[in-house]
Image (tube, rainbow, N blue to C red):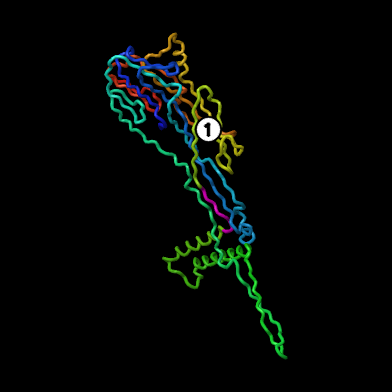
Amino acid sequence: MKTLISTGLLITLLIVGCSTIKVTNIKNIESYKEPALIFNLPKTILEIDVELNKTVFKKGPYADYAAELLGISDFIKQDTDLWQINNIQINSLTEPDTNNYYLLKTKGANKLNLISLSKNGILLAINQPSSKANADSKTNFLLNTNEENINIKDLSTSETVFAKEDTTYKYVKIDSNFVKVPIIDKEIITRTIEDKAKEAAKIIFQLRKRKLEVLTGDSEETPKESYLNTLIKEMNLMEEEYLTLFVGKKSTLKYHSKFYYTPNPQKDPIPVALFNFSNTTGISNSSSTSGDPIYIKVESSKNLLTINNLINKQIKPFTKGVPYRIPDQATITIFNSQQNIANIQLPINQFGIVNYLPCSLLKKGNVIEFYQEQGTLKRISE
């Protein structure tokens, strides 16, 4: 679990009894004049990390002659891209819940004991040094560094453009005699793709013949055994390069796209479109007309329904003491119109309830610890 933004749970509160402390939700306050501490409870946001594979298919320049010259039928017939969702990782982060900011006011001369906070101001422990390390935030580098151009080398061994000379003769009368004079005509010829394909096919067959001669011992010069494997390997690589001119080339690149979603107790579990996905264009905005929608649904387990009903039955709701969260478990599902793609169960802070630490537990000397990610009570000890 990661921390995105400080939840600011700065409860510097080791005060004897609730008569010296007053905690009020800021929504119920119009203004205040005396100095006071403001803290909040965290809410959960979801980070959806989508890992994609993009396979690029590049047509060979001689693909149109693959069947005719080499008898190959399995080759790339056009340039295309194929996108696939390889994995989806769902993580929970925390940020301040704007519906749960509190004003803490104290009175009297109260001695504050040891309080441990995260570097973001989240309360970790009271009366005890925290051993929990503060994780450094990691920057998401968004530019793709894997992108590459898939080029197919031109392996022609002959000139693309060459001059062809044609000599003709004519008789020219000089004085009283006729003299045979040569006339040279020059024609600039550009070799066609078909010419190049035939040349490449010829080299492929020559390489295969040469390999067979070397392996069967029919070669006029049999290479030394120590050099044989290297020679065969080099000829295989050369043949593969020439075959690429006919069958084409493909390369697979890996991409990551991240999306963030804040579960809403008033709206969930209504599905929400995260993004659109197409096998030919990849990921696009959920409002795009390209691809099919990929949805997220967050459904509360409602495990705390009984406790919540019990709290709501109180004639006078509990408001004294220090508020803390009890998160509820929820099932997060990523899906499209045909199938579920990923799911996980995670505690969602805002799906739970806000309870109050009893005044009797705020006595001097108690060690009080909170979970950094949920703002919920972890341990109370003397």
Is the residue 248 above or below the residue 363 in the image?
A: below
> Image quadrant for the N terminus?
top left
Q: Residue furthest front?
A: 33
In front of the other: 246 or 37: 37
Is the residue 98 above or below the residue 337 in the image?
A: above
- Residue at label 1? 334
Residue 344 is covered by the magenta coloring: no
| Circle 1 SS class | strand
Q: Residue at x 34, y 26 (%)?
A: 124
Q: Residue at x 62, y 55 (%)?
A: 73
Amino acid at the residue labelled 1: Ile
The percent position of residue 281, horizontal first and vertical second, equals 58, 43
Location of residue 133 by image quarter:
top left
Question: Is 297 on the left-hand or right-hand side of 96?
Answer: right
Q: Which residues are magenta?
A: 245-252
Q: Residue at x 33, y 31 (%)?
A: 132
Is the residue 355 above or below the residue 281 in the image?
A: above
The percent position of residue 90, horizontal first and vertical second, equals 47, 33
> Image quadrant for the C terminus?
top left
In front of the other: 231 or 53: 53
